Image (spheres, grey):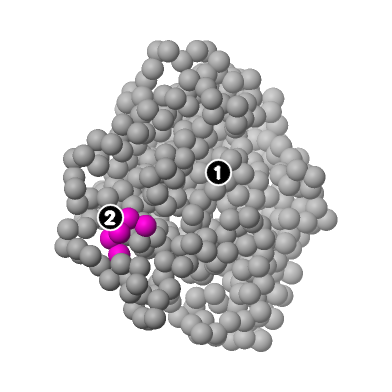
Amino acid sequence: MQFLWPKFLFHHQIELARDMGYAAARYGHVMFPENAHEPALRCAELLLGGIGKDWASRVYYSDNGSTAIEIALKMAFRKFSLDHGILLDSDKSITNERNIQLKVLALKGSYHGDTLGAMEAQAPSAYTSFLQQPWYSGRGLFLDPPTVFIRNGTCALSLPPSIQNCHLSPGDKCFPSLAEVFCNSRDSSAAADLYSTYISQQLSEYSVSSNTEHIAALIIEPVIQGAGGMHMIDPLFQRVLVHECRDRKIPVIFDEVFTGFWRLGVESASELLGCLPDVACYAKLMTGGIVPLAATVTTEAVFEAFKSDSKLTALLHGHSYTAHAMGCSAAVKAIQWFRDPSTNSNLDFDRMKLKELWDGTLVNQLSSLPNVKRVVSLGTLCAIELQAEGSDAGYASLYARSLIQQLREEDDIYVRPLGNVIYLMCGPCTTRDVCTEQLSKVYRRISHFNPIH
């Protein structure tokens, strides 16, 4: 469930509308190829000085998150092709086009958008079924990720069957708090060795099975898989995954369309992972949710892979309203709000992270209810998976329908469930008091929840 923008933009709605109105009156429509305007330049500066600080140098605008992913895949594939001799650097000509198939390395349960290419980069799911995407083939190697969640007040690690290992100690599977889950000291743990072995084995087996197919990009939702069920992926696993791909010169894409701009309590989820991408995608919170706009941010090395004397080697992707002035103006305002403690009282400016928004005692009480399977609480997100079996579980489930109706009609909480997973999602500026009030209502409802079939 989510209450996305109410309580968040209320105080700033007039300012956002005013800035967007000024941009519309001043610029109208600007065709962006070979042109630029102040809002787009200012937005790019803020992106490179914030989420792209110390690694990115280029911003490519588009209209939504799914399109940003399509652009990121093009960028990564070009860089891989150049680095691995598939392209000749002199004029970017192809050495042996007919025998080349570029695929992705991704995680099961991921979701990267509804456009055709984005769906090809995710494992089979309800979103890629024949009813939704008859062309779907799944162009990738999809790994089983380990997940982290709170149950009975304890932060626990769950390993999928493909990487089960009885040699992990209790200290590798249970943590006093989420802080220990993100601690870099785990890089020398038995779990890190287990993950490295699993990932290396999967990549080696895949490369041996085909001489024409190449894993040409890693694409992950850092830390939290959103539409796939609000699962927290063990950050150690993703960090090891990035390092393994770096060793193989496989470009790394972070899909931060959902996780970016303080969603997880920090400006970019890369801060939680402790590693950086080659390409990253942003949308949603970038404009405060008031108007669609997306950005694919990348390194100078990726940008150089598209440079030559021929126009045909450029990144030929765009639309008529690329970097539209109203969207860029909204993004400038929103990004500044989030980073300014005078407009965002939740910001711990010294550490550049959000203060805890969800009451820890309430979260632990929720996780201890007999009809709750797991809880994930991080930044602006608090997700609850209800205990359910068979057809009552999964995206198509209507198990929580009566609960959803009660929360909407009696508690004024707008609900958008993922089957038997319900979630609260506030804005970066939403006060802790509001979050506690909403979470208390959810706790009361779930503690008395008795589904009617």
Horizontal and vertical percent position of residue 16: 69, 69
Farthest residue to the front: give it.
Answer: 90
Q: Is residue 23 visible?
A: yes
Q: Residue at x 56, y 40 (%)?
A: 273
Q: Could you say which quadrant of the image residue 193 lies in?
A: top left
Horizontal and vertical percent position of residue 242: 46, 42
Please tell me which residue lies in front, 449 or 110: 110
Of callouts 2 and 1, which one flags the residue occurring earlier in the amino acid sequence?
2
Please tell me which residue lies in front, 353 or 251: 251
Horizontal and vertical percent position of residue 256: 52, 52
Which amino acid does the dot numbered 1 rest on?
Cys
In the displayed structure, would residue 308 be above or below residue 225?
below
Which amino acid does the dot numbered 2 rest on?
Leu
Question: SS at mark 2?
Answer: strand
Q: Is residue 2 visible?
A: no
In the displayed structure, would residue 134 be above or below residue 331?
above
Q: Residues within 10 Å of mark 2 (few under 14, many from 20)?
A: some
User: Quarter holding the N terminus?
Assistant: top right
Disc 1 target residue: 275
In the displayed structure, would residue 233 be above or below residue 151?
below
Q: Residue at x 60, y 27 (%)?
A: 185
- Asked if the magenta segment contains residue 184, the reply would be no
* Residue 7 in the figure: left or right of residue 148: right
Q: Residue at x 70, y 32 (%)?
A: 359
Q: Residue at x 41, y 62 (%)?
A: 75
Please tell me which residue lies in front, 210 or 438: 210
Q: Could you say which quadrant of the image residue 413 lies in?
A: top right
Horizontal and vertical percent position of residue 69: 42, 59
Q: Residues within 10 Å of mark 1 (few under 14, many from 20)?
A: few
* Residue 92 in the figure: left or right of residue 96: right
Q: Which residues are magenta?
A: 83-87
Disc sitting over residue 102 in the figure: 2
